[in-house]
Image (spheres, grey):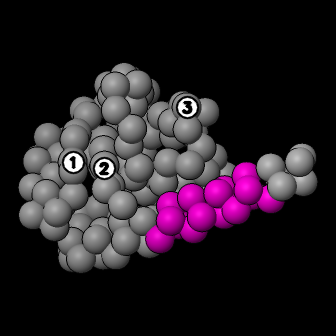
Amino acid sequence: MSVNILIVDDEEGIRKSLGAYLKLEGYHVDTAGGGAEAIEKLRELKRNIILLDINMPGMDGLETLRAIKSHDFSIQVIMMTAFSTFEKTMKSLEFGASDYILKPFDDLTEILRLIQLSEERLGRWKRNMSETIIKQRDQDQ
């Protein structure tokens, strides 16, 4: 499966360093500096996994997460934050985030592991949906 990742963070250094690392790992990567830009980029190209900062000016991560999930609920969203509250963490999971990681990243392999888990979820989702569609079609005939 070809995986397209979108990194959404208001810190340019995070976008560049994380993007460079993930490109070296073989992923297609794009970046956005905020929530509104991220939503616009979702309209242009299918993204499978989004790494989303929770604390951003303007459209914050929770608002962006809700917009992403209303656009395409199958997108895997990994929330990132340097500081957050328990309430924001729980809200992000309630709104459909698939995972959560703290910044600064001490070990980039942890992000890679979360992305790989998201890829597995996407594969299961695709297989299960295909099976459901086939069963439904068989029942309708």
Q: What residue sits 32% from the left and 55% below the top?
A: 3
Q: What residue sits 39% from the left and 38% below the top?
A: 46
Q: What residue sits 34% from the left and 25% below the top?
A: 44
Q: Name the side, left or right, on which 94 lies relative to 14.
A: right
Q: Residues within 10 Å of mark 3 (few under 14, many from 20)?
A: few
Rendered image quadrant of residue 58: top left
- Between marks 1 and 2, how big is the CA–CA gap? 5 Å
Specify the segment rendered in magenta.
Answer: 120-135
Label disc, if present, on residue 29 of the rendered structure? 1
Q: Where is residue 115 shown, x and y percent of the image?
A: 36, 66
Which amino acid type corresponds to the residue marked 3 in the rendered image? His
Residue that mark 3 sits on? 71
Rendered image quadrant of residue 9: top left
- Between marks 3 and 1, how big is the CA–CA gap? 19 Å
Q: What residue sits 48% from the left and 54% below the top?
A: 76
Above/below status of 81 relative to 12: below
Q: Where is residue 31 shown, x and y percent of the image?
A: 22, 39
- Between marks 3 and 2, how big is the CA–CA gap? 16 Å
Residue that mark 2 sits on? 5
Kindly give the residue lying farthest to the front in the view shown. Answer: 141
Which amino acid type corresponds to the residue marked 1 in the rendered image? Val
Q: Secondary structure at mark 3?
A: helix
Label disc, if present, on residue 17 of the rendered structure? none
Q: Where is residue 129 shown, x and y percent of the image?
A: 66, 56
Above/below status of 6 relative to 114: above
